[in-house]
């Protein structure tokens, strides 16, 4: 029989047969009760350093499992512990010594908590206090390893080691200083407030060590710099007094172009974490401006060899998050600051460098300026919309026309970002922006046809066009012919696949915006898509990408073109989508296919039933799949040893052991991005099936719910959001069935607590927003059933209050409350992300009201009213005031009949805010005032003269189309509520002179109801203004988007007019052009 050392030698032979037989023998040897002492002996005395290291690795794997350690006799344990300490002092090979230290650390985790290994602490202390440099270095190295694996157990012994840290961080032996710093870093996750005061004085010394290592060993400097971020994340009180010098050193490191990228990026990573977690300290220490100055300077960096290449653009805008180059990480960091800091703290100082750059001649500075505008838009959208909209648009228009490609591309990126985040205001500039983009696109396509290399700028212009078009909605319709001409030209077969992919994506964006206005182009679009989706393309990477984009575009077209147009093609599209999924194993393709399934469900409705047996298993496979998951091991040096297959299979105990940890060697898991997106899209597709095919899908709800529920705690926020959304729709699907109340209540018993938990504890704002939106959706669809069970109403109210009071986990992280008391009196401004979160919570309130009777809702509204009113004060932001006016307005209907206690506050609030300087605030105030009149009725009769005077004055000076529309709607509500209190001869002609409405077509319902009210009451002004009335209705029918409730109102009104005033009606109708008559008849049919 071979000895264990001989077996290890076989496994390490570079021969497959030797490895195979050696591994089989090792599996048997690992079952021996004496294997641990044997491995230690080999690890100490084998002549081969590789065998010694392998033996120590196997010993660590065995002893790291508590169950296996506890099986050893006391003698074996004592012998192993003393033998390991002896091995550390005698071992000369660094790799073997490192592996030995790892064994010590794994055992320390078991022994230190019960004070069973005092010899280890004495051993480390003796080494660290030795005069010999190499022994001190060894002691600190062992300390760093023990702190990493057993920091929680070690911290009770920290006090006597503090003096060792102080001494070591100033040691002339730089390695000793390094290991002291690493030991400190490894302890940070375990220390609490008791240890914080001991650690705090060490931070300045760590700064000195970092500075020294910058010129000696930058990799070690990077490792030490992790201390700063770890402290920000866990025990910020230690770092608080040193934030300014730490930040100044980080900025100094980031600014040095002679340093390597990793250390500069690490410095920027600290800045990003600082902005995310400690914005108040950043502002208090006056660090925002120097940080922004450094970031902007970094963003102007360029590599010399690329200076003369107009088209080689270092800023890969589609992959900003994937880069590790300092100037791009600087842009990411600026984006993070915009998201987490108050917008005025970012925009105002940033313009100090951006504005001169735009006016100057430095190409890289101009490029940086446009990238800076692009990355701050998401976080500062409201601030830009209200204060900088026109100059920013003019600036980017100039940038798009710039002669240098670097600048043009950055400006195009800014167009896309502004289009995405500055809605609806950006649409007003379509006539300024789109012609420039068309011209640029045309030039780009012409350059392709002349045989030139495809420039990167083609991606930029398509990106800008796509983002601009997708967010314009109906206002894009006049531009569709020109757009489609350019997009069809780009689909020319002679052009590269990538250009056709971009064109198809842009077509999808246009369809998303204009919907049925794409019907004239439906035939040619489908012809192109069939070519790419026929399955005849090769496996070429670029062709595959084109096919995936074609599938995505198909899903968008199916959803937006209109059920009547697409229905004849639905079955065929379903067939070749299923064929593609079955024939090609690609997560990106499957993800797009799931989107097609969801879109087809919106067209086919319950007729999707026949396809569900094929579709649902595909979706569930993605939901439950672990494909793409990769484990990351703790010890990279072990990857050369074939130890993975011989660990514990042979030693499985007949008893289930709660201490067993099968993942002891796994540091974490990563998941391929494509698989994450596939999983997310599968959840969303299931949600759509539950929404559009409720009848047949109900039989799948139970099958799908369990696996989807497991994803609500998934590590990736997009998956959590999609899972919550799908579960919500599953519950609604149950609730919409006949005789399903008990089943729905059972589902709600699971879902409501989970939504509540997500809102209160999830660290990501977007997940909390989704959970709040789920509450809103449940209340809208299920009404009182959603809050029928005990505790559910309280859960909803607690969540609203927690968000309003900034008490959720994500808000506390976002607010980053400081440890110092001196910050408590400092202003605590919200980021726009937090303001958006509060808006989501506000949306739950009217949905809750509509799910209850007014009498039930009133006391809960009363409890929340002070918070809402608090955000209407003069010093509040526009977003806060607009939100408050809006949420109060939509709560008037569910409070109908019980408004009296609230009337003084509400009347004062709406009338005051109607005079606000911001048009959006005024618009919501006018809407709220109209709703207050409608639902307060006689409570406001005495105030009618003042209200009418206010509205009259506002009509004469208001220049906002939305606000004008809501003034008109408020007047119609007053007429309906108490016409006798209105001087109709004065008011009605003025009202008619401001019709038709301009933008808020939802308010056409109020206009129509007013007309019907006047007709039914036989008011003479209705008859005398009948031609105007009919023209207003005609505009609604032919030029405006009708809401679902408006067509019946129009039908009723026109029927009355045609029967009561036949001559006038016939004369008016016969004078209309034929196409207008046809459109009118379609609505009246």
Image (tube, rainbow, N blue to C red):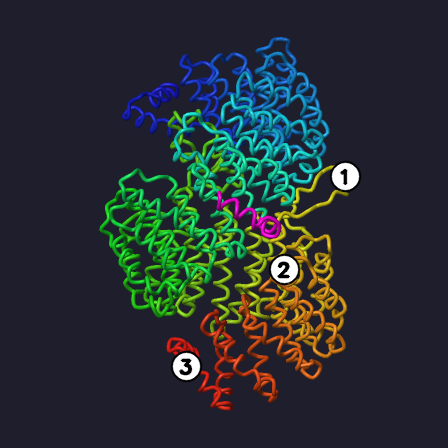
Which label was assigned to residue 1085?
A: 3
Asked if the residues shown at circle 3 and circle 2 are in contact, with their CB atoms under 8 angstroms apart, the answer is no
**Number of numbered discs visible in the structure rendering:** 3
In the visual, does 349 lie left or right of 661?
right
Residues at marks 3 and 1, CA–CA distance in whole angstroms: 70 Å
Query: Label 3 crowding class (10 Å Cα cut-off): few <14, some 14-19, many 20+?
Result: few
Judge by depth and name the residue closer to the eye, 152 or 27: 152
Sequence-wise, which precedes: disc 2 or disc 1?
1
First in sequence: mark 3 vs mark 1: 1
Quadrant of res 901: bottom right
Please report the bounds of the magenta region as a residue range: 381-398
The residue that disc 1 covers is 821
Q: Nearer the viewer, residue 113 or 795?
A: 795
Disc 2, SS:
helix
Q: Which residue is mark 2?
A: 919
Q: Nearer the viewer, mark 2 or mark 1?
A: 2
Front tag of 3 and 1: 3
Mark 3 lies on a secondary structure that is: loop
The reply, left or right, for residue 527 in relation to residue 888 is left
Coordinates of residue 160 in the picture (x, y in percent): 70, 22
Q: Is residue 386 magenta?
A: yes
Is 1007 contained in the magenta span?
no
> Foreground: 533 or 88?
533
Q: Residue at x 65, y 38 (%)?
A: 278
**Disc on res. 186:** none
Residue 149 horizontal/vertical position (percent)? 56, 29
- Placement of the C terminus among the 4 image quadrants: bottom left
Whether residues under marks 2 and 1 lie with C-beta atoms below 8 angstroms apart, the answer is no
Whole-Å distance between the Cαs marked 2 and 1?
39 Å
- Kindly indicate whether the residue at mark 1 contacts the one at mark 3 (C-beta within 8 angstroms): no
Query: Which residue occupies the foreground of this view, 856 or 335?
Result: 335
């Amino acid at each position: 029989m071979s000895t264990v050392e001989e077996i290890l030698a076989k496994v390490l032979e570079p021969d497959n047969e030797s490895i195979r037989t050696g591994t089989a023998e090792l599996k048997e040897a690992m079952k021996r009760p004496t294997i641990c002492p044997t491995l230690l002996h080999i690890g100490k005395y084998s002549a081969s350093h590789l065998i010694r290291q392998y033996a120590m690795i196997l010993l660590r794997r065995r002893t790291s499992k508590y169950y296996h350690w506890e099986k050893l006799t006391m003698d074996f344990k004592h012998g192993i512990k003393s033998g390991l300490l002896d091995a550390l002092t005698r071992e000369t090979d660094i790799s073997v010594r490192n592996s030995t230290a790892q064994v010590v650390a794994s055992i320390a985790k078991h022994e230190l908590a019960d004070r069973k290994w005092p010899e280890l602490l004495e051993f480390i202390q003796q080494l660290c206090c030795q005069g010999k440099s190499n022994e001190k270095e060894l002691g600190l190295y062992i300390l760093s390893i023990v702190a990493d694996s057993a920091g929680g157990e070690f911290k009770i012994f920290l006090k006597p080691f503090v003096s060792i840290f102080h001494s070591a961080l100033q040691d002339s032996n730089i390695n000793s200083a390094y290991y002291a710093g690493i030991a400190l870093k490894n302890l940070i996750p375990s220390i609490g407030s008791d240890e914080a005061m001991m650690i705090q004085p060490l931070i300045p010394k760590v700064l000195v060590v970092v500075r020294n290592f910058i010129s000696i060993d930058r990799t070690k400097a990077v490792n030490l710099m992790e201390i700063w971020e770890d402290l920000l994340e866990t025990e910020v009180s230690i770092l608080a007094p040193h934030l300014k010098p730490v930040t100044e050193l980080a900025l100094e490191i980031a600014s040095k172009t002679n340093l390597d990228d990793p250390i500069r990026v690490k410095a920027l990573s600290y800045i990003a974490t600082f902005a995310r977690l400690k914005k108040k300290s950043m502002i208090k220490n006056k660090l925002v401006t120097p940080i922004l100055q450094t970031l902007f300077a970094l963003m102007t960096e360029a590599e010399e060899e690329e200076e003369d290449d107009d088209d080689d653009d270092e800023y890969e805008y589609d992959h900003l998050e994937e880069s590790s180059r300092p100037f791009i990480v600087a842009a990411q960091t600026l984006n993070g600051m915009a998201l987490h800091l108050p917008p005025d703290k970012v925009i105002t100082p940033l313009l100090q460098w951006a504005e001169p750059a735009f006016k100057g001649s430095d190409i890289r500075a101009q490029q940086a300026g446009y990238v800076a505008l692009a990355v701050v838009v998401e976080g500062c959208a409201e601030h830009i919309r209200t204060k900088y909209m026109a100059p920013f648009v003019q600036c980017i228009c100039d940038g798009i026309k710039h002669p240098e490609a670097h600048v043009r591309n950055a400006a195009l990126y800014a167009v896309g970002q502004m289009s995405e985040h500055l809605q609806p205001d950006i649409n007003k500039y379509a006539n300024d922006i789109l012609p420039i983009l068309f011209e640029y696109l045309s030039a780009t396509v012409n350059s392709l046809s002349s045989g030139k290399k495809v420039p990167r700028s083609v991606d930029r212009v398509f990106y800008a066009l796509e983002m601009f078009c997708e967010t314009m909605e109906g206002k894009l319709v006049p531009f569709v012919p020109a757009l489609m001409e350019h997009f069809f030209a780009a689909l020319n077969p002679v052009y590269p696949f990538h250009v056709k992919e971009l064109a198809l994506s842009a077509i999808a964006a246009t369809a998303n915006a204009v919907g049925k206005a794409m019907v004239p182009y439906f035939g040619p679009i489908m012809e192109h898509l069939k070519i790419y989706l026929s399955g005849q393309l090769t496996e070429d990477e670029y062709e595959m990408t084109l096919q995936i984009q074609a599938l995505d575009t198909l899903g968008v077209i199916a959803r937006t073109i209109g059920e009547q147009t697409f229905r004849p093609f639905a079955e065929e599209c379903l067939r070749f989508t299923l064929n593609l999924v079955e024939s090609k194993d690609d997560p990106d393709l499957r993800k797009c296919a799931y989107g097609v399934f969801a879109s087809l469900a919106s067209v086919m409705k319950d007729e999707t039933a026949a396809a569900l047996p094929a579709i649902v298993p595909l979706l569930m496979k993605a939901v439950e799949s672990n494909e793409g998951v990769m484990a990351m091991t703790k010890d990279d040096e072990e990857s050369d040893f074939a130890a993975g297959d011989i660990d514990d299979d042979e030693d499985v105990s007949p008893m289930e052991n709660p201490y067993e940890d099968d993942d002891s060697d796994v540091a974490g898991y990563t998941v391929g991005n494509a698989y994450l997106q596939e999983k997310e899209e599968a959840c969303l597709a299931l949600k759509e099936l539950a929404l559009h095919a409720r009848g047949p899908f109900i039989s799948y709800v139970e099958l799908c719910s369990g696996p989807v529920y497991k994803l609500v705690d998934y590590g990736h926020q997009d998956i959590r959001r999609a899972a919550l959304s799908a579960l919500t729709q599953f519950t609604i699907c149950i609730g919409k069935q006949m005789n399903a109340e008990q089943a729905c209540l059972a589902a709600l018993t699971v879902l409501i607590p989970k939504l509540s938990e997500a809102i209160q504890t999830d660290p990501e704002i977007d997940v909390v927003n989704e959970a709040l939106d789920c509450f809103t959706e449940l209340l809208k669809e299920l009404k009182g059933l959603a809050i029928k069970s005990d505790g559910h109403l309280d859960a909803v109210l607690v969540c609203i209050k927690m968000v309003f009071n900034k008490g959720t986990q994500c808000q506390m992280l976002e607010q980053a409350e400081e440890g110092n008391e001196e910050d408590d009196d400092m202003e605590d401004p919200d980021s726009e992300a937090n303001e958006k979160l509060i808006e989501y919570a506000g949306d739950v309130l009217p949905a809750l009201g509509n799910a209850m009777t007014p009498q039930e809702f009133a006391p809960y509204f009363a409890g929340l009213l002070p918070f809402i009113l608090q955000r209407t004060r003069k010093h509040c932001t526009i977003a806060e005031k607009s939100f408050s006016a809006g949420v109060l307005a939509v709560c008037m209907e569910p409070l109908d009949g019980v408004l009296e206690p609230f009337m003084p506050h509400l009347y004062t609030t709406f009338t005051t805010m109607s005079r606000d300087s911001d048009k959006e605030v005024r618009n919501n105030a006018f809407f709220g005032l109209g709703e207050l009149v409608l639902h307060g009725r006689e409570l406001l009769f005495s105030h009618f003269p003042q209200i009418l005077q206010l509205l009259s004055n506002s009509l004469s000076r208001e220049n906002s189309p939305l606000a004008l529309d809501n003034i008109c709607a408020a007047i119609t509500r007053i007429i309906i509520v108490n016409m006798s209190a209105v001087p109709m001869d004065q008011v009605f002609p003025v009202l008619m002179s401001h019709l038709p409405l301009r933008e808020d077509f939802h308010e056409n319902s109020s206009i129509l109801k007013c007309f019907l009210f006047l007709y039914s009451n036989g008011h003479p002004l209705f008859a005398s203004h009948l031609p105007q009335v009919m023209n207003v209705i005609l505009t609604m029918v032919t030029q405006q988007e009708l809401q679902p409730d408006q067509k019946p109102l129009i039908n009723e009104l026109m029927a009355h007019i045609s029967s009561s005033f036949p001559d006038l009606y016939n004369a008016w109708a016969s004078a209309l052009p034929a196409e207008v008559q046809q459109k009118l008849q379609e609505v009246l049919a």
